[in-house]
Amino acid sequence: MEINWKKHIETNPKIMFGKPVIIGTRIPVDLILEKLSLGETTEQLLKSYPTLNKESIYACLAFASESVKNEVVTG
């Protein structure tokens, strides 16, 4: 299943200081990524944040993946 993260994530300087958030919420992408990295499941996130859906969670992962692909790593 391919997710188009642009349908789920936006940046707006008036929302959360321009951090990427899930459209229609004030839930930042980095919060979802952090919770997933700490072992929370999709089901737990959906229970904690009822405005989310599975596609928006997967969109956060797709966003992170694309962001990393476009980063230039030095060092």
Image (cartoon, rainbow, N blue to C red):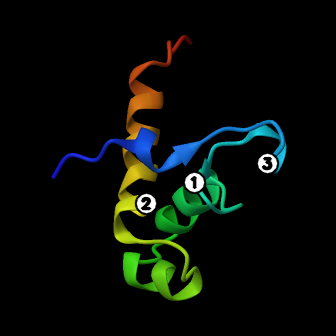
Question: Circle 1 is placed at which residue position?
Answer: 23
Question: Circle 2 is placed at which residue position?
Answer: 56
Residue closest to the eye, 8 or 58: 8
Real-space CA distance between mark 3 and mark 1, rounded to the nearest whole angstrom: 10 Å
Q: Quadrant of residue 35?
A: bottom right
Question: Circle 3 is placed at which residue position?
Answer: 15
User: For the residue labelled by badge 1, is the local secondary structure a helix, a strand or a loop?
Assistant: loop
In the picture, measured across the screen, residue 40 lies left or right of residue 65, that is: right
Residue 36 in the image, given as x and y percentages of width and height: 47, 66
In the picture, measured across the screen, residue 41 lies left or right of residue 16, that is: left
User: For the residue labelled by badge 3, is the local secondary structure a helix, a strand or a loop?
Assistant: loop
The amino acid type found where label 2 is placed reads Ser
Residue 59 in the image, given as x and y percentages of width and height: 40, 51
Counting residues from the start of the chain, the first of labels 3 and 1 encountered is 3
Q: Which numbered circle lies on residue 39?
A: none
Residue closest to the eye, 14 or 21: 14
Q: How crowded is the residue under tag 1: few (<14 C-alpha within 10 Å), some, or many (20+)?
A: some
